[in-house]
Amino acid sequence: MVEELVTAGVALASVGMAYAMCAARVVKQYERGVVFRLGRLRSTVRGPGFTMIVPFVDRLQKVNMQIVTMPVPAQEGITRDNVTVRVDAVVYFKVTSPAEAIVRVEDYRFAVSQMAQTSLRSIIGKSELDDLLSDREKLNQGLELMIDSPAVEWGVTIDRVEIKDVSLPETMKRSMARQAEADRERRARVINADAELQASKKLAEAAKEMSEQPAALQLRLLQTVVAVAAEKNSTLVLPFPVELLRFLEKAQQSSPGAVPPVPGAVPPVPGAAVPPAPPVAVPPPSSVPAVAPEPVREQLPSQDAP
C-alpha cells in the first residue's frame, strides 16, 4: 500500500512538473505577452517576468516594445520640376498597443515598410528638387504624418522619419556645378566692382588733398620710386614730370627759329623719334599750262656795213 502511494505521488509530481514546464513562460523586460485562449484574445496583456498559461489551451505571443529602425529601400521618382531622383530613408517606430499590433494587421513590420515606400514615392512627386536638397526637415515631417496616420490603427507609433540620401543624375550634377560656379563668379565680380568704386572714391579724395599741397605729390612720387627699387631688379623706373615737358614746349615755341606748330599736331617729346615730313603733292604734267616758245628772228645785215 505504501509503495502504491509512493508510486502515485511520484507520478503526480512528474505530471505536475511536466505541467509546470509546459505552462511556465518568461517575458523579457522589453516585451509584452498577448494570450490567445482557444483562439480568443485575452484582455490581459502579460507584463515582463514569470507567467503561467494553460498548456494546450492558451498560446502566448510575445511582442517587442523597443523602437525599431527600419531602412526604406531607395525609391526612384520624378519631382514636380521633372527631375528624376532616387531617395532612400529610414523609419523609427515602436509598438504602443501589443494586442492591436497582433490582431489588426498580419505583419506590422511589413505593413510599415510598404507604407513608408509608398509615402516616400508620393512625397517625391509632390516636392521640387530644391526642397529635397535644402528643406529636408519639412519633408521629414510630412513623410512622418503620411506614415503615422494609418499606423495608429495598427497599434504602432512612428517616432521619426529621416531622408538619408538623394541621388541625382550625372547631367544634373554637372549643371548644378556650373550654376554654382557661375554664381560664385558673379559674386566675385560684384565684390571686385565694389572695391574699385571704393578705391576710386578714396583716390579722388587723395587727389583733392594733393592738389592743395604740391609737395605731397612729390613725396608720393618718391615713395613709388622706393617701392619699385626695393625689389631685386636691374631696371629703375624714374617718372618724368609733365610740367617739364610743357616748359620745354613753351621754350621751343618762343625761340626765333622755331617752326610754328601745325594745328592739331601732337607736340614732340624730347628723346622721341621725329616722324618724317609729309610729302608735297606735285600736280601732274597735264595740269601745267604749256608756254609757247618765242619765234627766232633772223638779224639782217645793215646797209651801212662795208
Image: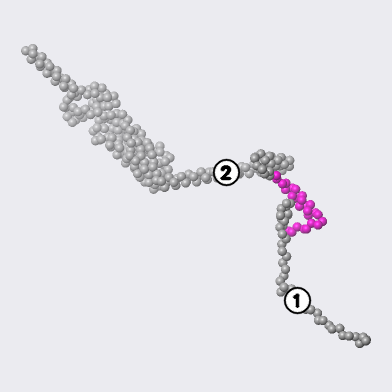
Q: Which picture quadrant has residue 274?
A: bottom right
How far across and how far down the image is residue 90, in percent?
A: 35, 36
Q: Is residue 210 visible?
A: no
The amino acid type found where label 2 is placed reads Asn
How far across and how far down the image is residue 76, in percent?
A: 35, 44
How far across and how far down the image is residue 124, in percent?
A: 36, 43
Residue 124 lies in the magenta stretch: no
Label 1: how many Cα within 10 Å (few below 14, some 14–19, many 20+)? few
How far across and how far down the image is residue 234, in percent?
A: 66, 43
Vertical position of residue 283 compared to residue 13: above or below:
below
**Mark 1 = which residue?**
290
Question: Label for residue 251?
Answer: none
Residue at image position (16%, 20%) is 17
The boundaries of the magenta stretch are: 238-264
The amino acid type found where label 1 is placed reads Ala
Mark 2 vs mark 1: in front: 1
Q: How many marks?
A: 2
Give the spatial CA distance, label 2 vs label 1.
74 Å
Task: Point out the image quarter for the C terminus.
Answer: bottom right
Q: Which picture quadrant has residue 257?
A: bottom right
Residue 256 lies in the magenta stretch: yes
239 to the left or right of 138: right
Q: Is residue 95 visible?
A: yes
Q: Nearer the viewer, residue 240 or 215?
A: 240
Q: Nearer the viewer, residue 216 or 66?
A: 216
Q: Nearer the viewer, residue 130 or 171?
A: 171
Q: Which picture quadrant has residue 285?
A: bottom right
Q: The residue tagged with tag 2: helix, strand or loop? A: helix
Q: How is the image coloured?
A: one colour
Question: Label for residue 192?
Answer: 2
Residue at image position (91%, 87%) is 303
